[in-house]
Image: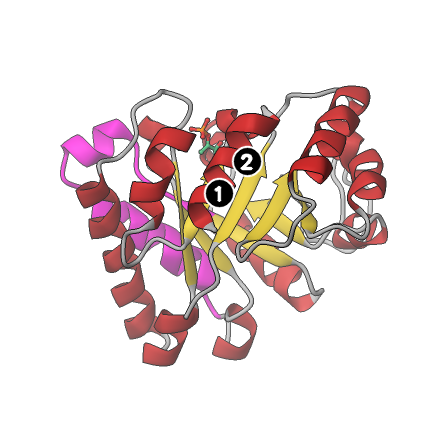
Amino acid sequence: MRTKFVAGNWKMYKTPSEAESLAKDLKERFSKPGRADIVVCPPFTALDRVSRVLSGTQLRLGAQDMHWEDQGAFTGKVSHDMLKDIGVQYVIIGHSEQRTYFHETNETVCKKTRKALETGLVPIVCVGETLEQREANKTEAIVQSHIEGAFQGLAKDLALGAIVAYEPVWAIGTGKTATPAQAQEVHAFIRDLVKKLYDADFSQQLRILYGGSVKPGNAAELFGLPDVDGGLIGGASLKGEDFAGIVAAAN
Ligand code: PEP
């Protein structure tokens, strides 16, 4: 039985002070233990402040990206050590906004995923097609290339530490959620694909999240699907009440 997982991606929202307030609000809301794993991913500048607030709670901390090198002359980037030193345990890799605006490729996703896994961080690897690709019947081909790219050359023991998030690009931040049938179809496709890449044990253990306009009102139906193990939440993770409603659906 896979434990449900809900992660909030705060994107480029919240100053450190605002992030601290939201973290305090979440700390109150999640004071009682639940069944799902809960992670919040604030911007880099707020990670340390949020980490201090969430220390000792059931909420875990994630970053929104990292570089694959240990250190060096890489202006603007952060490394795994920098993240772990302030309590980060998870890292979003290959988000569609990184792929679309910042030249993230399957190769860089693979390097980041490998480094995260090798250094004890849990990568949340994002995959998903654009509307144009869906309309051209390329959804499975794109998702397959994202999955094969991310896991290229990774041994099962290492790869088992990863989480995958299926995020149809046309559903991110648009208010257009995938229908339960659309989500289940792609999640089942991913599970079958990783079975072929690894084995049945891997495919049964891998947690596959859905992301794309998840709200308190649609979370329960999506999270109840056989191959959906929770969600990666953008806009609705910026308000404590909405995020709590979504986590309640996972619990
Ligand atoms: C995301 O950014 O990963 C996301 C799913 O955003 P939203 O929930 O706002 O669609």
Q: Residue at x 71, y 30 (%)?
A: 25
Is 129 contained in the magenta span? yes
The kind of residue on which mark 2 rests is Ala
Magenta span: chief secondary structure: helix
Residue 213 locus on image (x, y percent): 39, 28
Judged left or right of residue 106, residue 75 is right
Between 146 and 190, which is closer to the camera in this rendering?
190
The residue at 53%/78% (across/down) is 157
Mark count: 2
Q: Residue at x 49, y 34 (%)?
A: 245
Q: In the rendered image, which quarter is residue 100 located in?
A: top left
State yes or no: discs 2 and 1 in contact (Cβ < 8 Å). yes
Instruction: Note whether residue 251 is visible.
Output: yes
Which residues are drawn in magenta? 126-153
- The label number, if any, that marks residue 11 in the structure image: none
Residue 248: assigned label? 1
Q: Residues within 10 Å of mark 1 (few under 14, many from 20)?
A: some
Secondary structure under tag 1 reads helix
Left or right placement of residue 94 versus residue 189 in this view: right
Q: CA distance from mark 2 to mark 1?
A: 6 Å
Residue at which label 2 appears = 244
Res 123 quadrant in image: bottom right
Q: Is 5 above or below relative to 182?
A: below
Q: Nearer the viewer, residue 65 or 224?
A: 224
The answer to whether the residue bearing label 2 lies less than 8 angstroms from the nearest atom of ligand 1 is no
Q: Is residue 196 above or below residue 126?
A: below
